[in-house]
Image: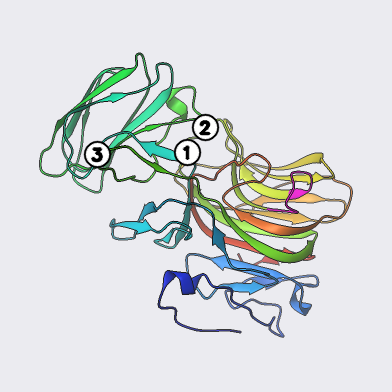
């Protein structure tokens, strides 16, 4: 096993190799059953504990395709900026969000402004700390903040193409943001994402695309812990983790279903779809566990180590591409924090 102290973010995400210990337990406390402890692939990305990660079976480094910076808050409510192409691990979680653009200009020096919006589209206005934003035009609302780190949020369907945000800064307004919710059709489906800091022009943050190449993994078992930020009513499914073969025809994923919030495991074998529902639902803003176990005849989903459901696929999956917080199938982003993702091939996992 490799142990070490990393001095940079880049070094922390370099590929780490480790030998499977004699006992069927990983260094981070997962118990292995089946054949994994004999030397097959086991990956444990425990973001809550940080590197070194356990990557037996990975064939490359953990990568992030997001080509713009991203932000997240640490445990002390300080805003941390993550560089482009670097997974945004802050406060013990990997943060994964869909693409958004902040239309509020000069966000570090808030001032009254008029913003062009699209009539009929859904927007979210938010800020942290004290102060008042009075909206008029495309929406009518007075937003009054509270002491930092409290966040004030208002979502609306634009009634015209012009939104005026009148600012009263009472000494503490931070990170004002106006962002289009591209997948929302109602205000109830909308939500804010982490701050995107702007200057004289609007600024976009690209979607996170975190992945890891693996050795061939037959009959995978995935376990994950995540905290969704999107409301239950949000329409797209939100994928916590997925392993596939680089196509949309063969994959296994654990996810939160759109609209209902159901915790499920989906499987595609040669394009044939089956779904195992755990019988339980995610709660927005609450950390929970969802695990999945694949055999040649069963796909099982387990939520919070208790609620269980299964389906009956037919065939053996051999997969090589682990995605975290997104899906190859439809690019359905997790939109929230991920504390841990583990993968075992040909075995099940406990102690999670």
Is 220 left, or right, of 209 in this rendering? right
Q: Nearer the viewer, mark 2 or mark 3?
A: 3
Classed neighbour count for the residue bearing mark 3: other residues with Cα under 10 Å, few (<14), some (14–19), many (≥20): few
From mark 2 to mark 3, how far is it between C-alphas?
31 Å
Element type where label 3 sits in the image: loop
Q: How is the image coloured?
A: rainbow
What residue is disc 1 on? 230
**Residues rendered magenta in the picture:** 243-251
Tag 3 or tag 2, which sits nearer the N-term? 3
What residue is disc 2 on? 234
**Label of residue 302 in the image:** none
Is 267 left, or right, of 262 in this rendering? right
The part of the image, by quadrant, that contains residue 191 is: top left
Tag 1 or tag 3, which sits nearer the N-term? 3
Residue 187, magenta (yes or no): no
From mark 3 to mark 1, how far is it between C-alphas?
29 Å
Measured along the vertical axis of the image, is residue 294 above or below residue 7? above
What residue is disc 3 on? 200
Question: Which residue occupies the foreground of this view, 310 or 62?
Answer: 62
Question: Which residue occupies the foreground of this view, 210 or 239?
Answer: 210
Element type where label 1 sits in the image: loop
Measured along the vertical axis of the image, is residue 263 above or below residue 23? above
Q: Residue 111 at what x, y percent from top left? A: 16, 34
The part of the image, by quadrant, that contains residue 142 is: top left
CB contact under 8 Å: marks 1 and 2: yes
Measured along the vertical axis of the image, is residue 119 above or below residue 100? above
**Residue 50, visible in the rendered structure:** no
Question: Which residue occupies the foreground of this view, 205 or 333?
Answer: 205
Classed neighbour count for the residue bearing mark 1: other residues with Cα under 10 Å, few (<14), some (14–19), many (≥20): many
Q: Residue 28 at what x, y percent from top left? A: 57, 74
């Amino acid at each position: 096993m490799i142990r070490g102290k990393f001095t940079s973010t880049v070094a922390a995400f370099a590929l780490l190799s480790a030998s499977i210990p004699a006992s069927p337990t990983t260094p981070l406390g997962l118990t292995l059953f089946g054949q994994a402890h004999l030397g097959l692939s086991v990956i444990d990305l425990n973001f809550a504990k940080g590197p070194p990660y356990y990557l037996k079976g990975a064939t490359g480094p953990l990568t992030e395709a997001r080509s713009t910076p991203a932000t997240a808050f640490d445990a002390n409510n300080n805003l941390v900026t993550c560089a482009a192409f670097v997974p945004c691990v802050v406060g013990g979680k990997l943060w994964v969000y869909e693409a958004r653009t902040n239309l509020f200009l000069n966000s570090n020096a808030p001032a009254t402004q008029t913003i062009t919006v699209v009539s009929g589209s859904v927007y979210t206005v938010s800020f942290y700390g004290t102060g008042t934003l009075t909206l008029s035009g495309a929406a009518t609302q007075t937003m009054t903040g509270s002491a930092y780190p409290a966040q004030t949020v208002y979502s609306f369907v634009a009634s015209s193409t012009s939104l005026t945000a009148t600012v009263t800064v009472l000494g503490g307004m931070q990170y004002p943001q106006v962002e289009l919710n591209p997948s929302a059709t109602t205000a109830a489906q909308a939500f804010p994402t982490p701050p995107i800091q702007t200057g004289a022009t609007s600024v976009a943050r690209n979607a996170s695309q975190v992945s890891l190449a693996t050795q061939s993994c037959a009959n995978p078992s995935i376990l994950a812990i995540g905290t969704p930020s999107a409301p239950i009513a949000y329409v797209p499914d939100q994928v916590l983790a997925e392993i596939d073969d680089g196509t949309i025809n063969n994959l296994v994923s654990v996810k939160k279903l759109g609209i209902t919030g159901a915790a499920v495991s989906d499987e595609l074998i040669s394009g044939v779809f089956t779904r195992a529902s755990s019988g339980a639902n995610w709660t927005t803003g609450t950390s929970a566990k969802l695990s999945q176990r694949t055999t040649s005849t069963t796909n099982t989903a387990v939520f919070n180590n208790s609620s269980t459901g299964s389906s009956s696929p037919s065939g053996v999956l051999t997969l090589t591409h682990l995605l975290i917080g997104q899906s190859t199938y439809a690019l359905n982003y997790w939109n929230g924090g991920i504390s841990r993702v583990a993968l075992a091939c040909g075995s099940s996992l406990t102690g999670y």
